[in-house]
Image: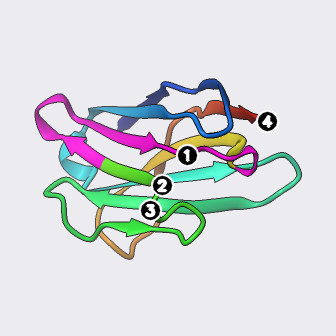
Amino acid sequence: QVQLVESGGGLVQAGGSLRLSCAASGRTFSTAVIGWFRQAPGKGREFISRITWNGDFLYYADSVKGRFTISRDSAKNTVYLQMNSLKPEDTAVYYCASAPRVGSGYDYWGQGTQVTVSL
């Protein structure tokens, strides 16, 4: 079992920044890949970023490229998502999830953290 806990969400004005954290515990040796997803009201889930525990295979969706940065602290079993230049369309519930390898399904999910960007 792997437990993932997101934190760092909140309300921010457009143009502002937030840093989300995803803390992993449990069988963390099986969390080779951590992905960030988001789901806005009335929309489907969007895959926005990914990192492996050794920092390889970084991915950013076009919608966040150049504004969001993913990183990890292996000693703390924590992955971060630094979000800059936030826009109202970034408003969503943000989730982190883990997968055993790149290309496999994400099998453990956090509970989500709300990010709201106001004008």
* Left or right of 115, for residue 77: left
Identify the magenta region: 71-89
Q: Is residue 78 magenta?
A: yes
- Please name the residue that numbered disc 1 is placed on: 85
| Circles 4 and 1: CB atoms closer than 8 Å | no
| Earlier-in-chain disc, 3 versus 1 | 3
Real-space Cα distance between discs 4 and 1? 12 Å
The amino acid on which the numbered mark 3 sits, given as a three-letter code, is: Gly
| Earlier-in-chain disc, 4 versus 1 | 1
The amino acid on which the numbered mark 4 sits, given as a three-letter code, is: Leu
| Earlier-in-chain disc, 4 versus 3 | 3
| Circles 2 and 1: CB atoms closer than 8 Å | yes
* Left or right of 110, for residue 115: right
Real-space Cα distance between discs 2 and 4? 17 Å
Real-space Cα distance between discs 3 and 1? 9 Å
Real-space Cα distance between discs 4 and 3? 20 Å
Where residue 47 appears, x then y in whole percent? 56, 63
Where residue 76 appears, x then y in whole percent? 18, 29
Depicted 13 relative to depicted 63: above or below: above
| Circles 2 and 3: CB atoms closer than 8 Å | yes
Tell which residue pokes out farthest to the right in this image. 42
Real-space Cα distance between discs 2 and 3? 4 Å
- Please name the residue that numbered disc 4 is placed on: 119
- Please name the residue that numbered disc 2 is placed on: 67
